[in-house]
Amino acid sequence: MKKILEVESFSKVYGRGCPRCFEQTGAEQTNICPSCKSVVAAHDVSFSLHQGEILGIMGESGSGKSTVVKCLYFDEEPTGGRAVFYDNGHQHSLFDLNTAKQRHLKNHSFGMVYQNPHLGLNFDISAGGNIAERLLMSGNNHYEKIRSKARGLLSRTEVLPERMDEIPKTFSGGMQQRVQIAKALATDPPLLFLDEVTTGLDLSVQAAILDLILEIQQELNTAMIVVTHDLGVIRLLAGRTLVMKYGRVIESGLTDQILEDPQHTYTQRLVASAL
Amino acid sequence: MNKTGGYPFGFLDEYAKKEVRRSVLKAIALPGYQVPYSSREMPMGRGFGTGGLQLTLSLIGKGETLKVIDQGSDDSVNAVNLRTFVEMTCPDVNTTTKTEEATLIQSRHRIPEKELTEKQVIILQVPYPDPLTVVEPSEDKRKVMHGEMDYSRLLVKLYEDIVKFDEITISHRYPTRINDCYILDPSPIPRFDVPKMHHSKALILFGAGREKKIYAVPPYSKAEPIAFEDVKFRVEDFNDEHGMRRCCARCGSKISFLDEFMDSRSGKKVYQCSDIDWCNQELQLAKKETETEKASEENS
């Protein structure tokens, strides 16, 4: 299998930080440094991702799982660490690129679906326009081609193509999420980030969205990082899982193993409480 | 007290003029880039052409000839006031209404119909210098977008237009890309005037007094209005319901930009050249032709 992404000892600190930040925080303690009050959102996070694979990142609120994804998608700047993206024989060291190159990768090779559609979609322009935006960003400049591509993507994600010229404000939460997925898929990215995509949706819609994600993975062989606090989502989607607490990875491995035989006390409690 | 009532030549002090000239040089070196400058207080409200006026006053010298137009007209209040101001503060500067006589043209919302020459400079007054204001409210982010040539959101605007109205509905301030790099706001000139910027022989300068920006299109630069590959930019065609090009009711010109207004007596729509100097010259030309025709008829 081809490797897509390799992350090594990634860390992110909010605040000015001090030399003792990392030793004074951790899974067993807290994520706020007692000396300088900085928040260590993530530290020493390492993992790799292969083509067509879904990696789950699980943890409670504030455990740093979203931070990892946001930094990889260049929404935020990391404090330390390395991340290498492998793209058709090219290697990109993500955190060393300049902003123009980062934007190029973001537009061509990455896709992001946020928990809140307000972050991923522009609510002032039509659903089709949102997808057009992404196609235009990746250098597509043919009106009819953009239209037909957007129509195709929306029907693929089961949004009625007749509604493509309506603004997403008039859509239900589930439909907004589908439009967001369609937008993320517009450039056929090899890597997709899903940040709590089903949180806040009702169960039947959740199931439909998860089905859609699995179908996409199997059809397009897209690698994904799924961030969620929902064990059900992890069980259904992810082949491998990281469990995070207070910014540290406390357990990682095959999802089945982690859910059936959790080693860390925190994971044990998490799995037990989900039942 | 000298002729200018105690003020230096050109009203502005030498330091102010020097700064504007430096900004102009930078603007020419970076076609389409908005150069910030410290727009001075002028004895008129911001938004009344203070940006253009500061450029004019900094660039004009003795023996030069200035033309001031406001939407094509030489004698609207704004144009007359600006012209009088320059006449008062710049002794030995000539003013004219004829496009071809001017070395410096300050204009609001129009580029003259007559093709400009290499010896001329046109200064346009700009209310909103940044074309990205319609899609991004934060100036910080807009600067980054310009820096990375991230203009896709402007095209999204066009996309939405075509979806809603089947055509691009931007009538003025049409975003235009200069030399394949920066996209600028060509000030509120109509679409009709945008192609005149492409490979223009004259230097085009833009001054925004309130927003404190100067930018330029150097002579013979590429100026391409943004559009899709399959939906092209087009100018106003002024065709009537039968598909015929309307002509000016006064001079009969069929190639000029027309203003539409209501005839107060008949209540009908009338079309007339927006560029008054052009209209007058066409009229004189037509008169001469009829005279020579008459003369040749009499001779025969």
Image (cartoon, helix red, strand yellow):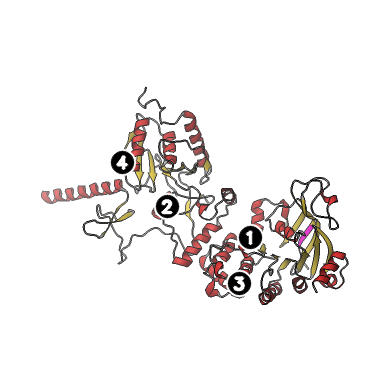
Q: Which range is magenta?
A: A3-7
Q: Which residue is mark 2?
A: B194
**Quadrant of the snapshot with the N terminus of chain A:** bottom right
Mark 3 or 1, closer to the camera: 3
Dot 2: chain letter: B
Q: Residues within 10 Å of mark 3 (few under 14, many from 20)?
A: many
| Amino acid type of the residue tagged 1 in the rendering | Asn
Magenta-drawn stretch contains A5 = yes
Left or right: residue B202 compared with residue B300 = right
| Amino acid type of the residue tagged 4 in the rendering | Thr
| Amino acid type of the residue tagged 2 in the rendering | Val
**In-front residue for pair A258/B148:** A258
Q: CA distance from mark 2 to mark 1?
A: 31 Å
Q: Residue B35, percent across and down?
A: 53, 42
Q: Which residue is mark 3?
A: A175
Q: CA distance from mark 1 to mark 4?
A: 51 Å
Q: Which residue is mark 1?
A: A107
Instruction: Tell me, yes or no, whether the two marked residues, 4 and 2, touch with CB atoms within 8 Å.
Output: no
Instruction: Tell me, yes or no, whether the two marked residues, 4 and 3, touch with CB atoms within 8 Å.
Output: no
Q: Residue A226, percent across and down?
A: 73, 66
**Quadrant of the snapshot with the C terminus of chain A:** bottom right
**In-front residue for pair B135/B278:** B135
